Amino acid sequence: MQNKKVVIGVIAAVFAVAVVLGYLIGTRSGGVRSGDAPVYSNAAGTSPSVGVTNRSNIIEDLKAGIKSNPNDPDLLLRLADAYFEQKQFAEAVNYYKKVIGIRPNDADVYTEIGLSLHYLGNSQEGLKYLDEGIKKNPYHQRIWLTKGFILAGTGDIASAKKAWEKTKAINSESPIGKAASDYLGQIAVKK
């Protein structure tokens, strides 16, 4: 029983660290999603949470832009990201799904849906989206790293380890690959 409590504590700690580091090293780093324009930054180049920009104004501005161009995937994606950053995960999922309707092969978006659903307490559905995104792009490191986070959060350490090993195998020298190595090391030390 005591061993089980230790494992659960390790899982929670690894997951918390993984989420924070994943956010920092993921495609959101520097406010840029790979292949897209900067998400949001103020004149100082800092994120809205650090700067003066009011996120609710950003959301309203993006909604207004979407009214005039409802199928603009970049606007939809930025709105989804704004909701995600405000921890309004149900709204984020709604808009991420709209982006997938337009860009069905965007693994970044599947990653965000999976993570949002996990935060909503629906990890199993989130994992389904991650697996769907992996089918679209099996070499997308961040989706594998996120899958490991969610699996670790559900207590499936063996599967999380496999996901992180895959992350590392794709490119062990990238920041995401190095993060996966760190998480694998933490699991090995905690056993």
Image (cartoon, rainbow, N blue to C red):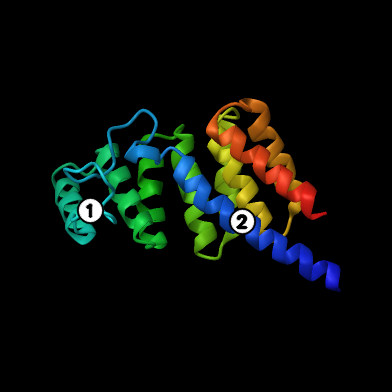
Please say if the residues under marks 2 and 1 sit with CB atoms less than 8 Å apart.
no
Vertically, is 36 above or below 150?
A: above
Quadrant of the drawing holding the N terminus? bottom right
Which amino acid type is shown beneath numbered disc 1? Answer: Gly
- Image side of residue 116 versus residue 158, left or right: left
Disc 1 secondary structure class: loop
Choose between 70 and 164: the one closer to the eye. Answer: 164
How far, Cα to Cα, is label 2 from label 1?
28 Å
Q: Position of residue 68 (x, y in %)?
A: 13, 45
- Circle 2 sits on which residue? 15
Q: Position of residue 155 (x, y in %)?
A: 72, 60
- Circle 1 sits on which residue? 51
Vertically, is 133 above or below 85?
A: above
Residue positioned 48% across, 40% down in the render: 25
Query: Hey, which residue is sitting farthest bottom in the picture?
Result: 1
Residue positioned 22% across, 44% down in the render: 70
Choose between 170 and 122: the one closer to the eye. Answer: 170
Disc 2 secondary structure class: helix
Which amino acid type is shown beneath numbered disc 2? Answer: Phe
| Residue 147 numbered tag | none
Give the mark, 2 or 1, whose residue is nearer the N terminus.
2
Q: 10 Å neighbourhood of mark 1: few (<14), some, or many (≥20)?
A: few
